Amino acid sequence: MKSSVRTLPQARTWRDIPHQVRPRAMSRGGRRRLWLTLGRTLGAVLVIGLLGGGIFVFTGVFRDKPQRIASAVNAVPLRPPVLRTDGVLDQAWLQRTLALPASATLMDIDLMQLRGRVLADPQVRTATLTRKFPDTLEVTIAERAPIALVNARIGNAAPRPLLVARDGVVYAGNGHDPRILQELPFLDGIKLVRSGDRFLPLAGMETVADLLATARNEAPHLYQEWRVVSLARLERDGEIEVRSGNVERIVFSTRSQDDFLRQLAQLDLLIDTTRARTDQPIQEINLAVGRMTDGRIQVPVTFDAPLDPAAVMPAPAPAISPTFFKTYRQTEREL
């Protein structure tokens, strides 16, 4: 018996149907976007290429620039250095100190070495050296100012006066007006210690400087009579002794530096009232041991010869001396 198998036709889809359709043309907007994209791409490539080329060119230029600058500067002779100072040192001092060769250029000099030469002078407190291209060296310094003198012997030479600054530095000094130096008092009761070619700074000079500055600014008629300032009792007793032209010895206390103005007020009043009662020279006024009596501070005054007790300790004058400085009234209220 034969079995018959019926074969069904294979199914077909729409893909099997031939299509006679032309591709759709690109619109105007699409073409514009395509060209913009291509332009951006080409522009980016061009920019990258230019940057790369510029970097290569400028790298070569800067690689050779230090040599070119050095060659150009070395061809320019150095001008005289420029000095800027807050003191009295001048251009001649600077040229002697730097001792630059005539053929030196700005790139030849060693700033650290030259700064060391400037600071080797104790009168110079700080120094800054700056190159100003193409041919100028600028030197800016801050100087020490003298507040007192000291006689010193160096080696076998005769003693000569040296200057003392507020920080205790002792130095020879250059360029100061001799008339100003003659007004400075000498120091006594100190010991100079030499270290190399210098003296070690003196201790306690800031306190002494405060006293001298207060007297010079507030009581110049007293300060101009001061001849010698002794530091012999400063460390042990906290006292400064002044030898003056009108008083042989004046003792100030340093327990409170703000007290110098009050002590100067007492000193001026004592000198005026004492001179009004006697012509006897005053041997000592000790402002460090005053005592309070009847609401006033009584200061011992010693004369060369014994006097009447009323003259030795005169009563405080009710009126202020006409020569007394302007701040006395305020000081008197604080007593």
Image: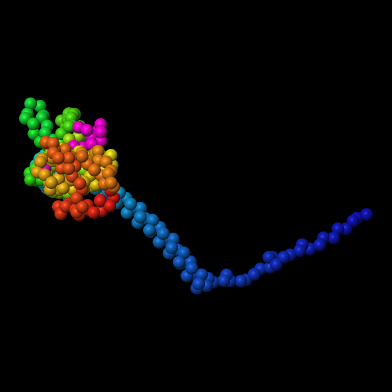
Which residue reaches farthest bottom?
28
**Residue sitting at x 11%, y 29%:** 154
Name the spot of residue 149 as percent of width and height, x first.
Answer: 13, 38
- Reply above or below: 191 against 295: above
Name the spot of residue 199 as percent of width and height, x first.
Answer: 17, 32
Q: Check residue 186 for magenta coloring.
A: no
Front residue of 75 and 211 = 211
- Reply above or below: 309 against 39: above
Where are the magenta residues, as a range?
232-246
Which residue reaches farthest left?
158
Can you tell which quarter of the image residue 303 is in?
top left
**Residue sitting at x 27%, y 52%:** 333
Front residue of 70 and 231 = 231
Q: Is residue 78 visible?
A: no
Please indicate whether residue 71 sits to the left or right of residue 20 in the image.
left
Name the spot of residue 320 as percent of width and height, x first.
Answer: 19, 53
Please indicate whether residue 9 sits to the left or right of residue 199 in the image.
right
